[in-house]
Amino acid sequence: MRAVEAIEEIWLTYQVTKDALKVATHGINRGAIELLQDTFFVNSSTDKAKSDLETCRRAAGDYAILSMWAIFERHVLDALVSENGKMLDMPPSDFNSSLHRKIGDAIEYWRSNDVLDLIRPLVGPDLVGKAKQIKQYRDWLAHRNPKKASPSNVPPTVAYQVFSDISRLLSIHISDLTGKEP
Amino acid sequence: MNTTQMEATAKFLSRLSDLYSNINNWVQPQYLRVVRSNMKLNEEAYGKYDVEKLSIVDANGKRIGELLPVGASVIGAEGRVDLIGDVDQEILVYLDNGGPHFTTEIEAGGQQERRTTPLYRGVEEDGWYWIEIRRLNRARRLDQALFLDLLAEVSDHACC
């Protein structure tokens, strides 16, 4: 699956999750046992079930951002790998083959901000800047320390749009390189 | 907190206060009232500061919804407050006229193409907006009718 589609799927999952949580809450509020049978809600107190749903609701956006980042980061690294592959278009030699291999191995370990700086000429500074800020927020979500101040907040819709836009531009670039449809 | 940070948080607090005053007026005809209480925010950009959250309660004192400030430092907005109910939550953001824009620069056919696109459509004045996640890029200015719809949506409260 292409990165743009994968990000789209996460976005859809986020929306459906929100709706499904809403349905479950309606079920609990209205005591609709037929909706709740065979779920763990049946043996929970109403307060506990509602509080669990509330926790899930708050977490849904965070998980969407974490998941979208994972797909996005992989896509950016793949774009660098494709670009690096151009080196072998030159007449292959021991030199360019070993350099290509060396860079290919190292790419996985490059810092995210450095990787994002590399795609700046392809997508522009605005999107790169936003992606870096989202990365900062993503790190805070992943290692959340209640004592630590939160970085700039990221509404899920903004993360979705930034990741989608960059991924689309990268796909166009990769397709130019490989001749495959973006 | 330095002067710039204080100005930024003061602006956010003032915008929140305006929003809360509007909400107070909007919900009164629905026999609902608002209750303000204090909480703290801790943002990297501005440090710790006091902020008010707003509960919307019915005639029996039952909480219908809550406006919970998230922060003044928000990517793609000038502040965020979440409307949280029993059933769902919605994100409200403060946007300046025109809203944020992204500039993308791509090379196509050997030519550099520069394109500026708004993050949200429909931002024609400064104010609080609700972002429709099902219709991407569409920001809707918060007014009484929209707010009551959102409150009903997140709370499952019949009167709104």
Image (cartoon, rainbow, N blue to C red):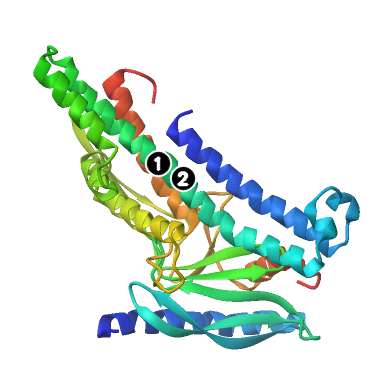
The residue located at (31%, 54%) in the rendering is A132
Q: Quadrant of residue A82?
A: top left
Q: Residue at x 44, y 54 (%)?
A: A158
Mark 1 to mark 2: distance in Å?
Answer: 6 Å
Kindly identify the amino acid type of the residue bearing the numbered disc 2: Met
Q: Is residue A42 left or right of residue B38?
A: right
**Quadrant housing the C terminus of chain B:** bottom right
Chain of residue at mark 2: A
Give B137 or A122, whichever is nearer the viewer.
A122
Q: Residues within 10 Å of mark 1 (few under 14, many from 20)?
A: many
**Neighbourhood count class around disc 2 (C-alpha, 10 Å): few under 14, some 14–19, many 20 upward:** many
Query: Which residue occupies 66% across, 85% down?
Result: B34
- Say which of A5 and B107 sits in front: A5
Q: Is residue A160 above or below residue A26?
A: above
Chain identifier of the residue bearing label 1 in the image: A
Rendered view: A120 above or below B153: above
Helix, strand or loop at mark 2:
helix
Nearest the eye: B25 or B150: B150
Q: Mark 2 = which residue?
A: A68
Q: Are marks 1 and 2 in contact (CB under 8 Å)?
A: yes
Q: Position of residue A98 (x, y in %)?
A: 15, 22
The x and y percentages for residue B110 are 18, 28
Which numbered tag is attached to residue A28? none
Q: Which mark is residue A72?
A: 1
Location of residue A73 in the rendering, given as x and y in whole percent from the top left corner = 37, 41
- Report x, y in % for residue A70: 43, 43
Q: Quadrant of residue A121?
A: top left
Which element type, helix, strand or loop, lies under badge 1? helix
Q: Type of residue at label 1?
A: Phe
